[in-house]
Image (spheres, rainbow, N blue to C red):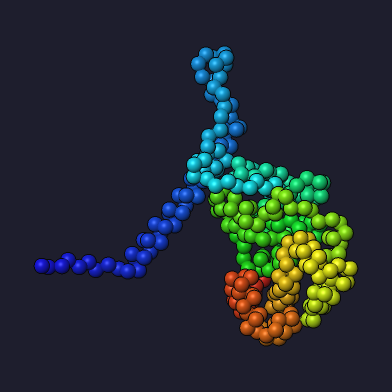
Amino acid sequence: MTLLTLDVDKAKFESLIARSRANAANSRRLCDWARVLTDRSARLCPTPIMGSSDGSEREPFTESPRAHGHPHPETTTPTMRRAVLVLVHDPLMRAFVADAIRGDHDIIEASDVPSAVKAVMGGGRVDIVVTGCFEARALEACATGVRALYESCPWIPVAVIADTPPTFKADVLLTGVRAFLAKDFTPTELTAVVARVGRRPDATVPTGVRVAAVKQTFTTLERMLADVPPLATLAAMVSMSRSHFSRTFHAVAGIPLRDYVRDLRLKRAQELMRSSRLSLSAIASEAGFYDLPHFNKAFRHRFGMSPTQFRLAALASASSSTT
């Protein structure tokens, strides 16, 4: 028996597979957006008149099972509805983001940070803020807005829609940002993020006294970063027990004390990498890490790259902004 063998170019074959997978992903994304746009058109356009021209036999409007990006009832799982504040300056993009999740969550819209803060502090429930930076030049303004939001209401988690370079992720350290989505997100992806990082609808809002106590702790930690006081000492400073302080800190800051200290040290480290020529070992020590391996591990976990790669990316970003 004679076997027929084919001379297949492995690289071309793998390239075709990769392109096929990318096309399939793009098709799913386009289908998701088509459902959102179809529903939006149905709500904006009048219902067609059926029968007589006087409109007396108008067809009643009913929403399809896929309205607002919903799958069919038989294929969906129950979703806990959250109150989502969509903070996007551009009204068209704000409508796109809001419509992508309107079927699963209650939507509040805001065009700027003052309006968002007013909505949060006005007594209404807000479980998560979704904000978007749809232009590269708007990233700095987006980071500024996220920090301002955290200053007023640190307990509110934030999801950012943007193409995020490493330097942007560093700029929003120690804020409420808990997730990032690419600009070509799908409604399904955004709904999943809201469910994952949003506050539970039954979660209580921290009192002003507790917020003030935790903010006092923020100042203490920043001042004593090289030698962070133990938990018992921090709790005593604000007249709380250790367990009460731990719960209160997590409720206000949005993350546990241990994670906050780690991010505070990473913030200090990335600032030194941008502004100095110190060695990584010296930066790790200055930022309060035990040693260089611990610093490398924490940095990779938070940014998805090594400190050296980050430093090179920051240098490249700085040189491109000056040219």
The answer to whether 3 is drawn above or below residue 100 in the figure is: below
The answer to which image quadrant residue 224 occupies is bottom right
Q: Quadrant of the C terminus?
A: bottom right
Report if residue 226 is visible in the image.
yes
Q: Is residue 171 above or below residue 275?
A: above
Which quadrant would residue 308 be assigned to in this image? bottom right
Q: Say which residue appears at 78% left-offset and 81% top-offset.
A: 226
Count of labels shown?
A: 0
Q: Position of residue 172 (x, y in %)?
A: 71, 64
Q: Is residue 316 visible?
A: no
Residue placed most toward the observer, 125 or 223: 125
Residue 145, x across and y down, in percent: 75, 57
- Seen as rendered, the residue at the extreme left is 1
In the image shown, does 235 or 225 lie closer to the viewer? 235
The residue under the point 30% across, 68% down is 9
Q: Position of residue 275 (x, y in %)?
A: 73, 77
For the N terminus, give its image quadrant. bottom left
Q: Residue at x 66, y 65 (%)?
A: 168
Position of residue 95 in the picture relative to residue 113 (left or right): left
Q: Residue at x 73, y 67 (%)?
A: 256
Viewer-side residue, 76 vs 27: 76
Q: Point out residue 62 in the picture as x, y percentages from the top left corner.
A: 56, 29
